[in-house]
Image (cartoon, helix red, strand yellow):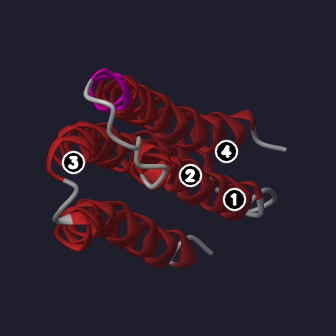
Amino acid sequence: MDPMIVAGAIACLGLSAAGSAFGTGFAASAAVGAWKKCYAANKPAPFILLGLVGAPITQTLYGMILMFIMLGKSGVQGAGIPCVILGIFAGLGIGLSALFQGRAAAAACDAQGETGQGLTNYFGALGIVETVAIFTMVFTIIALGKIA
């Protein structure tokens, strides 16, 4: 197997997963803070904040899907450098989507914990940020399909 293809596949997964780690970390910290405020005010702590915390994890799956498609290009002459380039830039796009989705989820955790309102709007905003990662994955799949 061409080591460049493997490098591109690993870069895509690794960068996507790094974004998910940052994003879920930001959101989790905010959820803990929101729960603390609820406990201090003798209010019920909203369990739904875990949904907001988990939103950025899906970008790791998109990176994994692209990783498997890239690894499937082994044996294709000249696929190494395109896979490295696609892997790095797709991984960055997907990972940054996760990072900023986590930042938005952190704000949503704070707002939901304080007001108990607006959850649908918060998930809608996170969905828009998620769309960047989905578009990146789909367009990368199209580009990988051109490598024959």
Q: Amino acid at mark 2?
A: Gly
**Distance from Cα at disc 4 to Cα at disc 3:** 39 Å
* Range of magenta residues: 35-40
Q: Taking 71 as reference, is 27 left or right?
A: left
Foreground disc of the pair 2, 1: 2
Residue 96 position by quadrant? top left
Q: Nearer the viewer, residue 26 or 141?
A: 26
Which one is closest to the eye, mark 4 or mark 2? 2
* Disc 4 target residue: 5
Q: Residue at x 43, y 26 (%)?
A: 25
Q: Which residue is mark 3?
A: 108
Say which amino acid is labelled 4: Ile
The residue at 75%/54% (across/down) is 71
Q: Which residue is mark 2?
A: 63
Marks 4 and 2 in Cβ contact (< 8 Å):
no
At x 57%, y 48%, the residue is 60
Query: Which quarter of the image is occupied by the N terminus?
Result: top right
Percent coordinates x, y for residue 49 in the rendering: 41, 48
Q: Is residue 86 visible?
A: no
The label number, if any, that marks residue 77 in the structure image: 1
Mark 3 or 1, which is nearer the eye?
A: 3
